[in-house]
Image (spheres, rainbow, N blue to C red):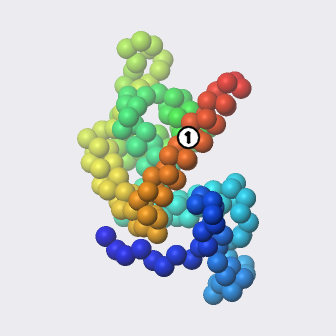
Amino acid sequence: MRAAPARNFVMLDNPTAAIPRNAASSPLPAMQRMSTSLSIFFLVQQTYRLVTTRVEEALDKEGMTARHFLLLDLLASHEPCSSADLARLACMTAQAMGESVKALKKRGLLDKTGSPDDGRTLLIRRSALGWETYIRCNRAVQQAEEDFFSCLPPMELARVRGSLALVRELEVARRQGDE
């Protein structure tokens, strides 16, 4: 494991809040720096973009995208599953999920079978090649995640993971209640 880089944050008496230090004196030109807003929405959005870039880089060797990996990862715990159910689980449109399923099926990573309960519904599962690809991609993504969050001590990382999981679950439940 590599050593954690020097912290570039000022921790407040609230350990969950941090202010970027010297944002104005950053070596990056103003147009390349991310916003220094402490709005949680903006911080999450900017972190999402950085995470997506890191995941895409980790998956590039396999010719996978973050969206395609998400599909394979969801199938790890929801296989077999319909495309509509996968779309709901991924918070994606049915059309976007359908395109991802089609692309992965074309590469031989997915198989479709008819549902024993309903002749119209097609159930999706990973093929043998899909399993092998998923295992390699999962290792690469886990390594990228470890590197990305190496700046956080283990207890803080556990707190971040728990907080994000809680917010996600509550928002999903709220949205399902609105339907």
> Could you tell me how many numbered marks the image carries?
1
Q: Nearer the viewer, residue 112 or 154?
A: 154
**With 19 as the anchor, is 2 left or right in this view?**
left
Q: Quadrant of residue 111?
A: top left
Q: Which residue sits at x=53%, y=59%?
A: 52
> Which amino acid does the dot numbered 1 rest on?
Leu
Q: As displayed, is residue 150 above or below residue 48?
A: below
Q: Quarter holding the N terminus? A: bottom left
Instruction: Read off the residue under disc 1.
Output: 166
Percent position of residue 46, x then y: 64, 62
Would you call the spot at circle 1 few (<14 residues within 10 Å), some (14-19), or many (20 or more)?
Answer: few
Q: Which residue sits at x=48%, y=17%?
A: 120
Q: Quadrant of residue 22?
A: bottom right
Q: Nearer the viewer, residue 132 or 4?
A: 4
Which residue in the rendered view is the most extreme toward the front? 13
Q: As displayed, is residue 165 above or below residue 112?
A: below
Q: Is residue 121 visible?
A: yes
Which residue in the rendered view is the most extreme toward the top? 117
Q: Which residue sits at x=61%, y=35%?
A: 170
Percent position of residue 172, x then y: 61, 34
Percent position of residue 149, x then y: 46, 64
Tell me the element at label 1.
Answer: helix
**With 140 as the anchor, is 172 left or right in this view?**
right
